[in-house]
Image (cartoon, helix red, strand yellow):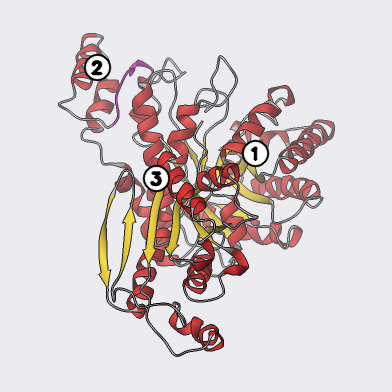
C-alpha cells in the first residue's frame, strides 16, 4: 500500500555541515513553512553518516513534496543520496521542487555571511563565478507547474514565498484559541460507531493499528446520550457505559490517536429536547459531568469534547443552549478543546446561521452527505424512497446512460418519490458548491472547521463513484485546511472490508489523496 503523506514538504539538507549560503536558505525555508503551518515540514539529513537508502525511501513517502536546494557544498561526497531521494520521489509519485541558486564572487568573510543570512538567505563568500540567473523549477508527476527565471537573490526569496503559500495550501487565518497541534490531530479520522453501545463491537486492535499506520490521527467516539443520562438509564447502566468509554480511551491513546467524545443524541433525548428544553439541559449537564470525570484522567491535548451531535431543535433554541452548555463544560474541563455545530443535521448551509461562541478554544463541526440521493441510495429502511435507488453514479448527469437507465427503472416500478429525488439532483452542484457556505462562514469568523461526518452507503453506490465522492470531499477539506472524520469504520458506510475485516485500501487511498 502506498504510504500516505504526513507532511506538506520534506527538506533535503546536510545537517550541521550546511554552514552558509544554500544551507542557510534551506533552513530558513523550512522555518518559514513551519511558521505558516506548524508541523507541515520535515527535514532529512543526507551526510556520510546519515541518510541510508531505506531511511530515504520512508522519508520521501512521508511528504507530499520533496524540496531540494542546489548546490550544497557538503553533498560533494554524498551526491548520490540526494539523487536517490529525487528518484524515489518520482517513483512514489511525490512532488519534486528544485531550487537552484546563483553563485557570485564576494569579499565577505564566512562570519559576515552568517550574520547576513537572515536578511539575504543565500550568501556565498568563496565560490567561483557562475551564471547570473537562478531558476526555480517545480515539477509534479500529475500536474504541470511553471518555471520562473529569477535574476537576483531577493527574487529567490519572493519565489520561495510563492512556494510556501502553495505548500501551505493558503490556509485561512484563524483566531488564536485552538492550539495548532490539536487542529493537526483532528486532520484525518474515522468514527468508531457502536463501540459504546456494545463493547463486543469494538474495532479490532489490528484494524485500529492499520489505520494509524496509514496516517489516520483521530477517532470520533459516539456516546449515545440515552445511555448516559439518568432519566433514561440506571446508575449501574451509566457506570458500565463510562467504563467502556474509559477502556476505549486507553486503547486509542496508546495507539497514538486523538479522541473526540461525542454526546450522540438519541430517540428518547431528542423527544425530551423538543418537549422540555430545561429538562434536556439538565440531562446534558449530568451526562457531561459524568463524562468529564473520565476525560480528566487523560491529557487535555488528546481528548476533546463534542457537546451534542445534530441537535434536533430550532436554531434559536440551540444557540442559547450551546452557550450555556459550553460554559458549563468549560468549568469541568478548563483546557479541553470543545467541538460543536449548528442544527439541521449540522449541514454546511446551516453554519451561516450559527454564531460562534466567545470561547476561542472551539472547533466547529459540519456533516456532509450531499447529494443524499447518491450517498444514501439503497437505504436500509424499505419505507424510504431512497431504498429504491440503486446504482446511481457520481457525478450525476442527465446524459449518463446509467442515470437514464435508473430513471427508466424507477418509472417502470412506479416509484415517483425516488424518481423525483434523482431528478432534483440533476445536475449535481459539485462538492465545492455544497460546502461553500461553511467556507464563507470561516472567512467571516476565522474559526477552525472539521467535517466530522461524511460517507456513502456501500450497499447501492457504484464502487468507483463512491471512491470518487470520498476523494472529492477530503480533497476539498485539505484545500480549506479542514479536518475530516469519515462515517464510519465497519458498518454500512464503513471503510473496512466486510469480508477481511481489514481497511479497504482503495477507500484509504481515496480519503488520503493517494489514489
Q: Nearer the viewer, residue 116 or 367?
A: 116
Q: Which mark is residue 406?
A: 2
- Single out the residue that lies furthest toward the left: 399
**Residue 100 position (above or below residue 303):** below
Furthest-top residue in this view: 412
Q: Which SS class for mark 3?
A: helix
Q: Residue at x 76, y 49 (%)?
A: 295
Q: Disc 3 designates what residue?
A: 475
Residue 308 can be seen, yes or no:
yes
Element type where label 2 sits in the image? helix
Where is residue 321? Give x, y as percent.
59, 55
Which of the pair 268/479 is nearer the observer?
479
Residue bearing the label numbered 1: 221
Residue in the image at 25% along x and 14% along y: 410
| Residue 502, quarter of the rendered image | top right
Q: Tell me: 41 left or right of 416.
A: right
Residue lying at the far right in this picture: please name it. Answer: 236
**Overall secondary structure of the magenta stretch?**
loop
Amino acid at each position: 500500500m502506498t504510504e500516505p503523506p504526513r507532511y506538506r514538504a520534506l527538506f533535503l539538507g546536510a545537517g550541521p555541515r550546511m554552514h552558509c549560503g544554500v544551507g542557510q536558505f534551506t533552513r530558513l525555508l523550512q522555518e518559514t513553512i513551519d511558521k505558516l503551518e506548524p508541523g507541515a515540514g520535515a527535514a532529512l539529513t543526507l551526510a556520510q553518516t546519515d541518510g541510508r537508502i531505506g531511511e530515504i525511501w520512508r522519508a520521501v513517502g512521508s511528504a507530499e513534496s520533496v524540496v531540494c536546494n542546489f548546490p550544497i557544498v557538503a553533498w560533494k561526497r554524498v551526491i548520490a543520496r540526494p539523487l536517490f531521494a529525487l528518484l524515489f520521489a518520482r517513483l512514489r509519485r511525490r512532488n519534486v521542487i528544485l531550487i537552484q541558486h546563483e553563485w557570485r564572487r564576494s569579499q565577505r568573510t564566512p562570519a559576515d555571511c552568517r550574520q547576513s543570512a537572515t536578511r539575504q538567505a543565500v550568501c556565498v563568500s568563496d565560490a567561483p563565478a557562475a551564471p547570473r540567473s537562478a531558476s526555480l523549477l517545480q515539477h509534479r508527476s500529475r500536474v504541470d507547474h511553471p518555471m520562473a527565471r529569477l535574476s537576483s537573490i531577493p527574487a529567490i526569496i519572493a519565489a520561495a514565498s510563492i512556494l510556501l503559500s502553495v505548500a501551505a495550501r493558503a490556509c485561512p487565518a484563524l483566531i488564536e484559541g485552538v492550539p495548532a497541534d490539536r487542529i493537526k490531530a483532528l486532520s484525518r479520522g474515522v468514527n468508531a460507531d457502536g463501540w459504546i453501545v456494545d463493547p463486543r463491537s469494538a474495532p479490532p486492535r489490528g484494524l485500529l493499528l492499520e489505520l494509524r499506520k496509514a496516517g489516520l490521527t483521530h477517532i470520533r467516539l459516539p456516546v449515545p446520550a440515552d445511555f448516559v443520562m439518568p432519566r433514561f438509564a440506571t446508575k449501574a447502566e451509566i457506570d458500565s457505559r463510562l467504563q467502556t468509554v474509559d477502556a476505549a480511551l486507553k486503547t486509542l491513546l496508546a495507539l497514538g490517536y486523538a479522541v473526540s467524545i461525542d454526546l450522540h443524541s438519541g430517540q428518547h433525548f431528542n423527544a425530551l429536547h423538543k418537549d422540555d428544553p430545561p429538562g434536556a439541559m439538565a440531562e446534558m449537564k449530568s451526562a457531561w459531568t459524568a463524562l468529564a470525570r473520565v476525560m480528566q484522567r487523560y491529557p487535555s491535548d488528546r481528548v476533546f469534547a463534542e457537546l451534542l451531535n445534530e441537535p434536533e431543535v430550532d436554531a434559536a433554541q440551540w444557540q442559547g443552549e450551546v452557550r450555556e452548555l459550553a460554559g458549563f463544560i468549560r468549568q469541568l474541563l478548563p483546557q479541553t478543546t470543545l467541538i460543536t455545530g449548528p442544527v439541521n443535521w449540522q449541514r454546511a448551509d446551516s453554519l451561516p446561521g450559527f454564531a460562534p461562541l466567545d470561547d476561542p478554544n472551539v472547533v466547529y463541526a459540519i456533516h456532509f452527505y450531499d447529494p443524499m440521493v447518491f450517498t444514501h441510495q439503497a437505504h436500509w429502511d424499505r419505507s424510504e424512497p431512497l431504498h429504491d435507488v440503486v446504482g446511481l453514479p457520481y457525478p450525476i448527469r442527465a446524459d449518463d446512460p446509467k442515470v437514464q437507465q435508473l430513471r427508466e427503472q424507477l418509472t417502470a416500478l412506479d416509484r415517483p418519490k425516488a424518481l423525483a429525488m434523482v431528478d432534483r439532483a440533476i445536475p449535481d452542484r459539485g462538492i465545492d458548491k455544497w460546502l461553500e457556505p461553511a467556507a464563507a462562514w470561516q472567512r467571516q469568523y476565522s474559526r477552525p472547521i472539521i467535517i466530522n461526518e461524511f460517507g456513502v452507503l456501500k450497499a447501492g453506490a457504484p464502487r468507483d463513484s463512491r471512491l470518487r465522492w470520498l476523494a472529492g470531499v477530503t480533497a476539498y477539506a485539505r484545500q480549506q485546511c479542514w479536518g475530516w472524520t469519515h462515517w464510519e469504520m465497519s458498518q454500512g458506510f464503513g471503510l473496512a472490508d466486510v469480508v477481511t475485516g481489514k481497511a479497504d485500501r482503495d477507500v484509504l487511498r481515496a480519503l488520503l489523496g493517494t489514489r
